[in-house]
Amino acid sequence: MLEEAKLLEEDFDKVAANRSWASRFILDGVAYATSLFWQPLQNKEDPYLEVGEAAEGILEGADLFCIKPGKSAQFGICVSQEGYKVGENVAAVALATAMSNKSSFVAVFKVEGGWWYTCIRNDIILSDGDMLFLNEEEAKNQFMSMLAVPDWGAKIAPPEWNIEETDYPDLSALLGKGEIAKLQKIKAIRGTKLLIVVAVSAVVGLWLISSIFSAIFTAKPKAPIVAPVAPKSVKKVEPPPPEPKPWEALSEPDKVMVQCYDRILALVNILPPGWKIAPLSCSAGGATTSWKLEVGRITWGLKALDDSGVNFSARSLSDDGKTMMATTPLESIKKVNSPPSMRQKDLRDTLNDLFQALGQDVTLTNHSYTSPQKNTYRSVKFKISSIQNPMVWNDLLTKFSGLEISMIKYNVDTKIWEYEGTIYAL
């Protein structure tokens, strides 16, 4: 969502009214910025180059940023035309530092104007792990999908969601304990550094000229001293370890599609009397859906889940007893090395030609990412809607090297499947 933030100022009010997320919430009279796009930071002393490259290549138009300190330093970027302001506190940094004793946690806090979802894994804020949803169901779906991932140090959710093994600490107290990081302008770094460099250079230059003048005109000549020159010791610089490429550890795409198909069918076949199933979604983390009560009782819905034979990683019931949610995990899927075989332009042309031959509409988006070691990785993201199930698309899509299936969705009412994924390019 944040990657589409290429807005003209006059369009901001119209887009903000239609989007499903917000850029800030107010707590105890303090504005906290949220929904930043997070990336790892390699050079803590001089972050501008990395921040600038991300602003140009990953989130075009980004003009504000902040730094998350710690052993896994990161920077978050955002676009001021989306409603962000210089000097605002950044919520994700305050929460991450306040809960630094938990290297991994997933949380949703109900705040003024929405539901703030944040997800930190191994001390790293995930790129989509800082989002203020305006819709409660979207926030809950995102939270439930992450419960399929094991080994969380903490799971935080509103108590009215009735999700087992979750806590709900006071957000105000947590943010008060965390470090304060404020949004600042990206370009401001360059100007400040330039002034410092100019000032230091001037001082050094004056000192050098003074030293040369003193050495030539005032110093007494000294007798030359001849001494043996010790051999110079050259310290060997160890090259950095090779950087893992994003396509070297992809979840095997055909297994993701097959298992998602099986899990979605299993959930669709759960038919509680008087309950209506919502659209389903599935990723490598598991399949998730919900049911709405139209007539009947809670016990009928819970019994249908109990008798289904489906292994659930998470189940919950809304506070009013009218919505059930459930997530079922996929079996372990091995990681594969699937290097790209085509350049970005050729891949895009090939995909367009394939889908045109099939008479199938497709949305394609070029994407690039610059890593901490300054390697640029390119890909083409795709999104399709079809009446054909994953077994049909499996053979077609898995012909492409570097394929990653991000999400599969199914709408029971329309019988439409939606597929989202990425194919890496040279």
Image: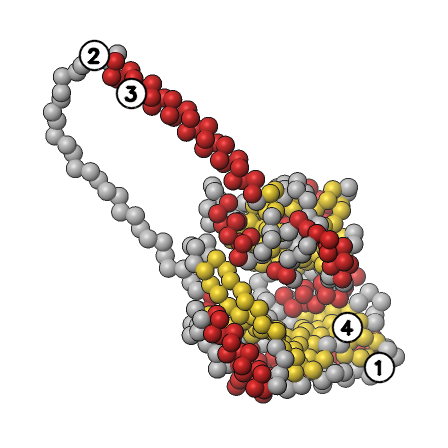
Q: Nearer the viewer, mark 4 or mark 3?
A: 3
Residue topped by disc 2: 220
For badge 2, the amino acid type reads: Lys
- Which comes before the other along the chain, label 4 or label 3? 3
Residue pictured at 70% horizontal, 76% vertical? 280
Residue pictured at 55% horizontal, 49% vertical? 75
User: 75 and 323: which one is in front?
Assistant: 75
User: 360 and 265: which one is in front?
Assistant: 360
Looking at the rendering, which quadrant does residue 178 occupy? Answer: top right
Q: CA distance from mark 4 to mark 3?
A: 82 Å
Residue pictured at 66% horizontal, 79% vertical? 385
From the viewer's perspective, is 131 left or right of 304? Answer: left
For badge 1, the amino acid type reads: Gly
Q: CA distance from mark 1 to mark 4?
A: 12 Å
Identify the image's colour scheme: rainbow, by chain, secondary structure or one colour. Answer: secondary structure
Q: Horizontal and vertical percent for residue 20? A: 73, 62
For badge 4, the amino acid type reads: Met
Residue topped by disc 4: 324
From the viewer's perspective, is 227 left or right of 355? Answer: left
Residue topped by disc 1: 274
Q: Dots 2 and 3: beta carbons under 8 Å? A: no
